[in-house]
Image (cartoon, rainbow, N blue to C red):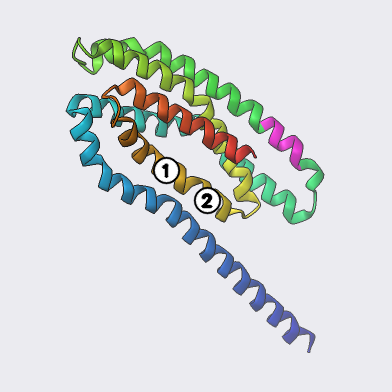
C-alpha cells in the first residue's frame, strides 16, 4: 500500500514539475516572441526614417549591447541555480549573501565593460566601421552613451536570474515584453520629432535604466 502511495506521489510530483516547466517555457517564448514580431514590423520604417547608415549604426549598437550580456560571465545563470538549490533545501538565510556578492561582481564587470567599449569607440567609429565623416561626431556620442548603459544591462541580467530562481517567469515576462517592444517602437516615436541617432540612443538608454529599476523593485 505504501509503495503504491509513494508511486502516486511521485507521479503527481512529476506531473506538477512538468506543468511548471511547460508554463515557464511558454512565458519565455512569449517574452522573446512578441518583441521580435514588433521588430520585424517596425524595422522597415526605422530604416526609412533613419537612413541606411544611421540604422546600420543602431543595429550594431543593438547587437553589441546584446553581446555585453555575456559580460556577466554566467553569474546570472549561476545565481539562479544557487538560489534555487538553497530554496530546495530550505536554507533561505544564505540567499541574501549570494545576491549581494553577485550584484557586486556584475556591477564591477559592467564598469569594466563600459571602460572597454568606450576605449574602443574611436577605433570602431573612425577606422573599422568606415562611418561617413559627416556622421562621425553623432555616432561617437551615441557609442559613448551606450557604453554607459552596459552596467545597467549586466546587472539587469543578474536581477532577472533572481526572479527566475523563484519561478517568477510571469513577472519577468511582464517586464520583458513592454521593454522589448519599446526598444523598437520608441525610436519610431522619437523620429517623429527628430532624425537624430543620438536622440534615439538616449531613449534606448532610458529604457535600459527603467528595465533595471523595474526588476529591482
Tell me if residue 170 can be seen: yes
Percent x, y of residue 115 = 48, 14
Q: Residue at x 21, y 16 (%)?
A: 131
Q: Residue at x 47, y 29 (%)?
A: 206
Q: CA distance from mark 2 to mark 1?
A: 10 Å
Q: Disc 2 on helix, strand or loop?
A: helix
> Crowding near pointer 1: few (<14 within 10 Å), some, many (20+)?
many
Q: Earlier in the sequence, mark 2 or mark 1?
A: 2
Q: Which residue is mark 2?
A: 174
Determine whether, in the image, residue 23 is placed left or right of residue 123.
right
Q: Which residue is mark 1?
A: 180
Percent x, y of residue 127 = 24, 11
| Start-end of magenta stretch | 95-101
Q: Residue at x 47, y 33 (%)?
A: 207
Residue 118, numbered label: none
**Quadrant placement of the N terminus:** bottom right
Q: Quadrant of residue 180?
A: top left
Percent x, y of residue 11 = 64, 78
**Quadrant placement of the C terminus:** top right
Whether residue 114 appears in magenta in the rendering, the answer is no
Percent x, y of residue 212 = 56, 34
Q: Quadrant of residue 98?
A: top right
Amino acid at each position: 500500500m505504501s509503495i503504491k502511495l509513494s508511486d502516486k506521489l511521485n507521479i503527481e510530483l512529476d506531473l506538477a514539475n512538468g506543468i511548471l516547466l511547460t508554463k515557464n517555457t511558454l512565458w519565455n517564448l512569449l517574452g522573446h516572441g512578441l518583441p521580435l514580431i514588433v521588430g520585424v514590423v517596425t524595422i522597415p520604417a526605422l530604416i526609412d526614417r533613419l537612413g541606411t547608415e544611421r540604422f546600420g549604426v543602431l543595429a550594431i549598437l543593438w547587437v553589441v549591447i546584446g553581446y555585453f550580456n555575456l559580460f556577466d560571465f554566467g553569474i546570472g545563470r549561476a545565481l539562479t541555480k544557487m538560489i534555487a538549490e538553497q530554496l530546495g533545501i530550505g536554507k533561505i538565510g544564505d540567499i541574501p549573501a549570494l545576491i549581494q556578492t553577485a550584484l557586486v561582481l556584475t556591477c564591477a564587470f559592467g564598469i569594466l565593460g563600459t571602460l572597454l567599449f568606450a576605449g574602443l569607440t574611436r577605433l570602431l567609429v573612425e577606422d573599422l566601421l568606415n562611418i561617413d565623416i559627416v556622421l562621425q561626431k553623432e555616432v561617437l556620442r551615441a557609442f559613448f552613451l551606450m557604453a554607459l548603459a552596459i552596467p545597467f544591462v549586466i546587472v539587469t541580467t543578474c536581477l532577472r536570474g533572481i526572479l527566475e530562481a523563484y519561478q517568477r517567469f510571469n513577472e519577468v515576462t511582464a517586464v520583458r515584453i513592454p521593454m522589448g517592444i519599446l526598444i523598437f517602437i520608441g525610436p519610431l516615436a522619437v523620429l517623429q520629432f527628430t532624425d537624430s541617432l543620438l536622440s534615439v540612443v538616449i531613449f534606448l538608454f532610458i529604457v535600459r535604466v527603467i528595465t533595471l529599476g523595474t526588476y529591482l523593485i
